[in-house]
Image: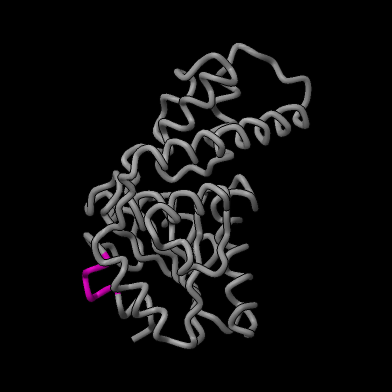
Amino acid sequence: MPTILLFDVDGTLVTSGGVGRRAIEKAFEQRHGRRDVVSFSFAGMTDKAIVRDGLLALDKRFASSAELRAEIDATIAFYLRVLEGEAAATGGIRVHDGILRALELAEARPNVALGLGTGNMREGARIKLGHAGIYHRFTFGGFGDDSIDRSEILAAGARRGAAQLGAPLQDCRVVVVGDTPKDITAAEAIGAACVAVATGMHSLPELEAHAPTLACQTLGDERADAVLFGG
């Protein structure tokens, strides 16, 4: 079957050494005067959800949901400028074990569409994966620009993958690769298979407890090939 692969970014494709968190914290400190409001875990959260929760924790009332949405957009734009500088200064964004092998296998198959399914804004994904040297390998995706909700992001990525394959979405397999329980839940919500990798903040037993299609330590585990490519 035509297959759409949707890869999460942070903790799945790469480890960024905390670049994203530092950029969010600096953005809040510089724009809003406080960084403590984003001291919670970002694992599995979309950029918009992180910024929204940080803004709601400020000692400030928003007159309307439209005002809140406008400030989310403005803070994210500020964050992305900070992120570019942080990523350039760090030089420590590293591709996880097994990822390059999986990408090469996917690229060798004409019936596989290789995309992203990430809560990062498209520009944030470009910055992080560009510094890791792999952004060019993904020709489409679902991004934080599409929605604040991860399942809606994955659904957008799946539609774009089907369009790239020239096949109806209902005729395609969709496989999500992620590193958090939220990736597993979102994959299930759109009827996709899920390979969960313990390369992020969650251990293998924690991921297995959420019943993904397969949980493995890294994508170097050849058992993942059958799920990714339908073998």
Residue at x-position 56% and y-position 36% = 81
Residue at x-position 37% and y-position 55% = 132
**Where does the image place residue 33, in percent across and percent down from the top left?**
55, 14
Above or below, 155 relative to 107:
above
Above or below, 171 relative to 96:
below
**Where does the image place residue 161, in percent across and percent down from the top left?**
58, 73
Residue 222: say if magenta: yes
Residue at the farthest top position = 59
Residue at x-position 46% and y-position 69% = 137
Secondary structure predominantly adopted by residues drawn in magenta: loop
**Where does the image place residue 69, in percent across and percent down from the top left?**
71, 34
- The quarter in which the C terminus is drawn is bottom left
In the shown orientation, is residue 129 left or right of residue 121?
left
Residue at x-position 55% and y-position 34% = 79
Question: How many marks are shown on the rendered structure?
Answer: 0
Above or below, 5 relative to 209:
below
Q: Which residues are magenta?
A: 219-224
In the shown orientation, is residue 135 left or right of residue 219?
right
The chosen color scheme is one colour
**Where does the image place residue 116, in percent across and percent down from the top left?**
50, 62
Residue 221: say if magenta: yes
